[in-house]
Amino acid sequence: MKLIDLRSDTVTRPTPAMREAMARAEVGDDVYGEDPTVNALQERVAALLGKEAALFVPSGTMANQVALGVLTRPGDEIVCDSGAHCISFESGALAALWGVQARTIAAERGILDPASVEAAIRPQGDVYPRTRLLELENTHNRGGGAVYPLERVRALGALARRRGLHLHLDGARLWNACAATGVAPAEYASEATMVSVCLSKGLGAPAGSLVCGPRDLVAEARRLRKRLGGGMRQAGVLAAAGLHALDHHLARLPDDHANARRLADGLAALPGASLPFPVETNLVFVAFAGRSATELAVRLAKEGVLANPEGSRPDLLRLVTHLDVSREDVDEAVRRAARLLA
């Protein structure tokens, strides 16, 4: 029985062509800035996002955190959605590393409204934390892979500038947002002081993210990367996978989105199923009436289908389509789920 792994788009294996690119990578010591493949990747992604510079880091969490560390000071406050990745899934790093707190807004599908953001900005005064930064997540994981409308990003960027705030864009799945809308990465990133993007979500690389922004801030991010142990020496082997992914895997992201819609349609037809969110990209959230998501995940695994409980409510499962999941795999996953729920 073939295992169909729908837990995340991070579970992909490098393709044979990607492995070949990694094997051929020219390398040097990136801590000294001497890895030519890392340098090429950084220049490529900075250009794609319309920023002066980029920094290759091991993970999306590190990309977000070094950006937040650069843009805030201890005692500051950031404004973000209540389900934002940087406060939900990064082990308390915002507080533990930088001494910064979050003021959260419960936004529909994680898409912040300018009026709500403005209301959350603290007045100036000795008793208040300084609101320093506005954080957006595109696509929004806990919003079911929701895509920010470009006009909303522009409105939030204008608000941030008017109120003297930095804007950080967590673009771990920004490539998916661009594939869904046709908006160029640089357009989404233009409002952000700093932006992170991931190579191991959606694009199928084995590891790595980048944080991009003005050259002086990226230089400071490099210092924080070192502090966090993120200097990877001959990292060109991983950077080569990222370059290959940009060349060969960006254009196929709409396939993942089509497979996610097909998966959602199949699951929605099963007894007791409900979909709390429309499917915009490669994330599918489904609940089954009276069923525990944890129990269902265990039972599905016995049928060779891996999915994760989403965590925000006890009945919600998250399933993610990706490079290693075909249309046929989607149909088979639905058939196995149907047998289980019959």
Image (cartoon, helix red, strand yellow):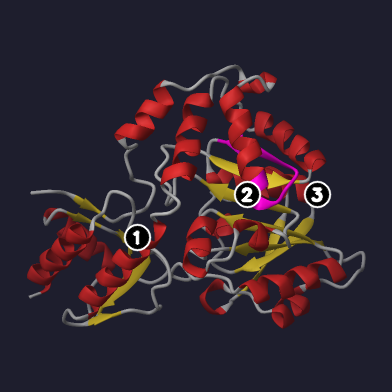
Instruction: Residue 190: name its quadrant.
Output: bottom right
111 relative to 201 in the view: left or right? right
Helix, strand or loop for disc 2: helix
Let me know if residue 317 appears in the view. Answer: no
Q: Give me the disc on residue 73.
A: 3
Tag 1 secondary structure: helix
Residue type marked 2: Leu
Foreground residue among 60 and 36: 36
Task: Give the vertical position of 334 relative to 33 (above or below).
Answer: below
Mark 2 vs mark 3: in front: 2
In the image, the segment drawn in magenta is: 47-57
Q: Determine the secondary structure under disc 3.
A: loop
Of all residues shown, which one is farthest toward the right? Answer: 125
Q: Earlier in the sequence, mark 3 or mark 1?
A: 3
- Measure the alpha-carbon separation of dots 3 and 1: 39 Å
Whole-Å distance between the Cαs marked 1 and 2?
Answer: 22 Å
Q: Are marks 1 and 2 in contact (CB under 8 Å)?
A: no
Residue 103 placement: quadrant: bottom right
Identify the residue position indicated by label 1 in the image: 256
Locate residue 225: give its quadrant: top right
- Residue 5 placement, left or right of 190: left
Q: Which residue type does callout 3 highlight?
A: Arg
Q: Is residue 140 left or right of residue 272?
A: right
Nearer to us in this view, 98 or 13 = 13
